[in-house]
Structure formats: structure tokens, C-alpha cells
Image (tube, rainbow, N blue to C red):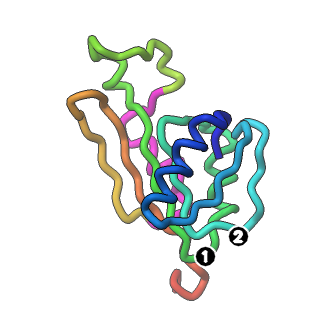
Amino acid sequence: VDVSPVGLRLAADFARTCGTYVNWIAADLDEFTPAKDAYDLICVFRFLDRISLPRKISSALRPGGFLIYEAFTTAHLARGDSHMKNPAFALAPGELPRLFATLHAISAVEVDLPDRAVARFVGQRLSRELRK
């Protein structure tokens, strides 16, 4: 899901060259509500909505489905090359795994890369059988 049809077209072209099918949806995430138990994989990059997105994602993942998430951290705000100025759009240390506490955390790291400081999270929605 992305608000930019241009970005989605570029992503779809790339996926096609890789022989991969992706369900691309042009929509504003502030207004879009995905179907319950509909997705095996959800990827989020450079988008942060602490209020509704964790609930939407947890509900939209099928049992056994995975979330891959990457967003800027507050460390990114301090970088001289950062375009970000508003701390509301950056994750505090350790925040991303807490936002998705209903998922089984497979990996949660915070990294300083040459061009950005980000938190990365991979989580899985466990089925009831896997939780026992």
C-alpha cells in the first residue's frame, strides 16, 4: 500500500522482472483498512503511525504471516544529512518491538548506516497452535 501510483508502478515493474507477484494497492495508509487475516507478508519502510498501524498490521497478517518493518530512529535526527526534523516521525530506542508486542519477534535491531539511522524489526503472527 502506498499513496504514490508512480512509486507503485516502479515497484511493480521491478517485481515483474524478478518473477514475483505482489498485491500492490494505491491508498493512503491513514484511511486504508486491510482485510483481516489476508496477508502472508507485510513490509513497511519509512512510515510511522504509532496509533493505528500496529493494530491494522497485526489483524491483517494471517497466522504464521510475517512483518518486515524499517523506520528512522531518533538517532537519525541528529545526523547532519538528515532531512527529518520532527521527532514524532522517528522511533525511540527499543520502541519498534514494543509497538508490535503481539507478534513474535524474530529480529529487532537498530543500526547506523552510511545514509540513515533506522530500527529494523521482523516479527511473525503466531497461530494459536504455535503459541502453546
Is label 2 in contact with label 1 (beta carbons under 8 Å)? yes
Q: Which residues are magenta?
A: 90-104
The residue at 77%/45% (across/down) is: 32
Q: Earlier in the sequence, mark 2 or mark 1?
A: 2
Pointer 2: what residue? 37
> Quarter-wise, where is residue 9 in the image?
top right
Residue closest to the eye, 13 or 100: 13
Q: Residue at x 55, y 71 (%)?
A: 65
Where does label 1 land, which residue? Answer: 63
Q: Secondary structure at mark 2?
A: loop
Residue type for callout 1 = Pro
Residue 97 falls inside the magenta stretch: yes
> Does residue 35 appear to the left or right of 99 in the view shown?
right
| Other residues around mark 1 within 10 Å, as few (<14) / some (14–19) / many (≥20) | some
**Residue 33 position within the rendered picture, expressed as x and y whole percent measured from the top left:** 77, 50
Question: Is residue 130 rendered magenta in the image?
Answer: no
Please tell me which residue is depicted at 65% across the width and 47% down the height of the picture.
1
User: Which residue is at the front of the view, 3 or 91?
Assistant: 3
